[in-house]
Image (spheres, rainbow, N blue to C red):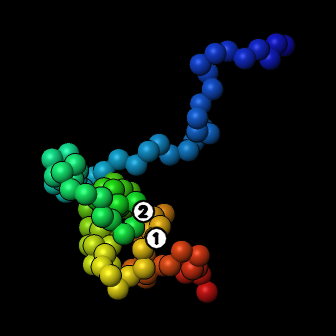
Amino acid sequence: MSTEHVAGTETAEPEGAPGPARPTPVAWVLLLPIRFYRKAISPYLPPMCRFYPSCSTYAAEALTRHGAARGSYLAIRRLLRCGPWTPPGRDPVPERFTFRRQSPGMSTEE
């Protein structure tokens, strides 16, 4: 038996791994104003976000990953944290949804 490598047959993800998240229909509608903001308004404003990723990127990812209701909750919670009373830094969208605020490095397991 030959173990030749055939070009173009390798995959980036292991078999059985889920593909990229797709937004639900309601989340897709909620993404429209975010896309409009990012294309039509954001290029004319100076960069001033306190967090990485930016709030619009965070909201789009939260809606795509967690759906309309949970994603909206996460996006609104993030916007309410955006102020001088919160230290800036990296704030990624959580892999699993929870109502508890999770600081980087903080575990919700007890």
Picture quadrant of residue 39: top left
C-alpha distance separating marks 1 and 2: 6 Å
**Residue 14 at x, y percent in the picture:** 62, 39
Between 92 and 98, the residue placed more toward the observer is 92
Q: Position of residue 91 (x, y in %)?
A: 44, 68
User: Of callouts 1 and 2, which one flags the residue occurring earlier in the amino acid sequence?
Assistant: 2
Residue lying at the far right in this picture: please name it. Answer: 1
Residue behind mark 2: 52
Evaluate whether residue 78 shows in this view: yes
Residue type, mark 1 in image: Gly
> As displayed, is residue 100 above or below residue 4?
below
Question: Dot 1: few (<14), some (14–19), or many (≥20) neighbours within 10 Å?
Answer: few
Residue at (20, 56) in percent of width and height = 45
Residue 13, compared with residue 87, is above or below; it is above
Q: Amino acid at mark 2?
A: Tyr
Q: Which residue is the site of mark 1?
A: 89
On the rendered image, what quadrant is the C terminus found in?
bottom right
Q: Regarding mark 2 in the picture, which secondary structure is present there?
A: strand
Residue 109 horizontal/vertical position (percent): 59, 81
Q: Position of residue 38 (x, y in %)?
A: 23, 50
**74 relative to 17 in the view: left or right:** left
Residue 55 seen anywhere in this rendered image of the structure: no
Residue located at (50% from left, 79% from top): 103
Mark 2 Cα shell of 10 Å, populated few (<14), some (14-19), many (≥20): few
Q: Residue furthest front?
A: 46
The answer to whether mark 1 and mark 2 are in CB contact below 8 A is yes
Judge by depth and name the residue closer to the eye, 57 or 110.
Answer: 57
Q: Quadrant of residue 8?
A: top right
